[in-house]
């Protein structure tokens, strides 16, 4: 059965939350109350115990919601949390991640060019993320921008669900879906100063209907 992803893929980044003084639990509640059902937690610097504690907090917020919860990078911690896992193209390969998290878990993989998309299409990942579509400020080591043409090329290279990421905003999100993405991963676009994350998420979901 083909995996069907929600159009909005909210990424909860620990460093971004900390920099902006936002509570993890409160932010998760805002996403939940907006109707978000696909969430990734990303913490590049936290200790394993801290990451698991954060995953438990998010799980508690979404306990009554049929949501897909994905942990970035750490297949071992994802297995303990009973979450899916998302790996980078230089991290654990999807086949090895599958051995850790099991057959029933969702696995995603990041790609940044056509060759990586082709390799991911042939592998064990359930979905393929491609980007950055536009310039992004949330990753200091971001790959070169691929633009909407990169999304179109990726769409032509795989039938797997395609997640576009990188610099996606309310103003450009529709163009990304029109280019062939099944879902859009958003970080900064859900954390605009002076705006409630719930309202921003609701606006994204409305556009993505």
Image: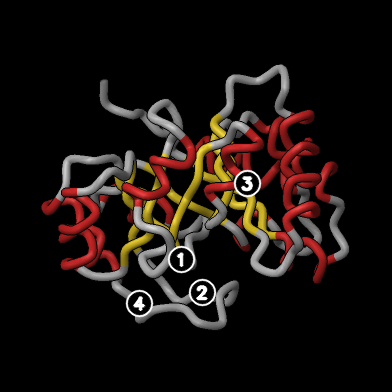
Kindly report the distance in space between the C-alpha atoms of the residues bearing marks 3 and 4. 30 Å
At 80% from the left and 54% from the top, the residue drawn is 50
At 48% from the left and 52% from the top, the residue drawn is 185
Q: Which residue is mark 3?
A: 77
Q: Is residue 209 visible?
A: no
Say what secondary structure mark 2 lies in. loop
Badge 1 vs badge 3, beta-carbon distance below 8 Å: no
Say what secondary structure mark 1 lies in. loop
Badge 3 vs badge 2, beta-carbon distance below 8 Å: no
Badge 2 vs badge 1, beta-carbon distance below 8 Å: yes
Question: Which of the two labelled residues, at mark 3 and mark 2, occupies the earlier sequence position?
Answer: 3
- Say which mark, if any, is on residue 174: none
At 19% from the left and 58% from the top, the residue drawn is 119
Q: Which residue is mark 2?
A: 136
**Quarter occupied by the C terminus:** top left
Question: Which of the two labelled residues, at mark 3 and mark 4, occupies the earlier sequence position?
Answer: 3
Q: Which residue is mark 4?
A: 145
Kindly report the distance in space between the C-alpha atoms of the residues bearing marks 1 and 4. 8 Å
Q: Residues within 10 Å of mark 4 (few under 14, many from 20)?
A: some
- Say which mark, if any, is on residue 166: 1
Horizontal side of 109 relative to 31 (left or right) equals left
Kindly report the distance in space between the C-alpha atoms of the residues bearing marks 2 and 4. 9 Å
Q: Whole-percent x and y of residue 195?
A: 76, 54
């Amino acid at each position: 059965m083909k995996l069907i992803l929600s159009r909005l893929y909210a990424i909860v980044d620990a460093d971004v939350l900390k920099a902006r003084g936002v509570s993890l639990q409160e932010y998760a509640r805002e996403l939940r109350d907006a109707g978000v059902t696909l969430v990734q937690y990303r913490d590049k610097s936290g200790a394993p115990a801290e990451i698991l504690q954060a995953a438990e907090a998010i799980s508690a917020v979404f306990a009554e919601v049929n949501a897909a919860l994905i942990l970035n990078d750490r297949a071992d911690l994802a297995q303990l949390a009973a979450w899916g896992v998302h790996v980078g193209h230089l991290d654990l390969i999807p086949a090895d991640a599958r051995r850790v998290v099991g057959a029933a878990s969702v696995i995603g993989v990041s790609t940044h060019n056509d060759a990586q998309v082709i390799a991911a299409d042939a592998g064990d990942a359930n979905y393929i993320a491609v980007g950055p579509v536009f310039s992004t400020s949330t990753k200091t080591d971001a790959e070169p921008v691929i633009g909407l043409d990169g999304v179109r090329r990726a769409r032509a290279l795989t039938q797997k669900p395609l997640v576009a990421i990188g610099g996606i905003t309310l103003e450009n999100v529709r163009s990304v879906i029109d280019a062939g993405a099944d879902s859009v991963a958003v970080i900064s676009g859900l954390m605009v100063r002076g705006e409630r994350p719930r309202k921003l998420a609701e606006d994204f979901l409305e556009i993505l209907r």
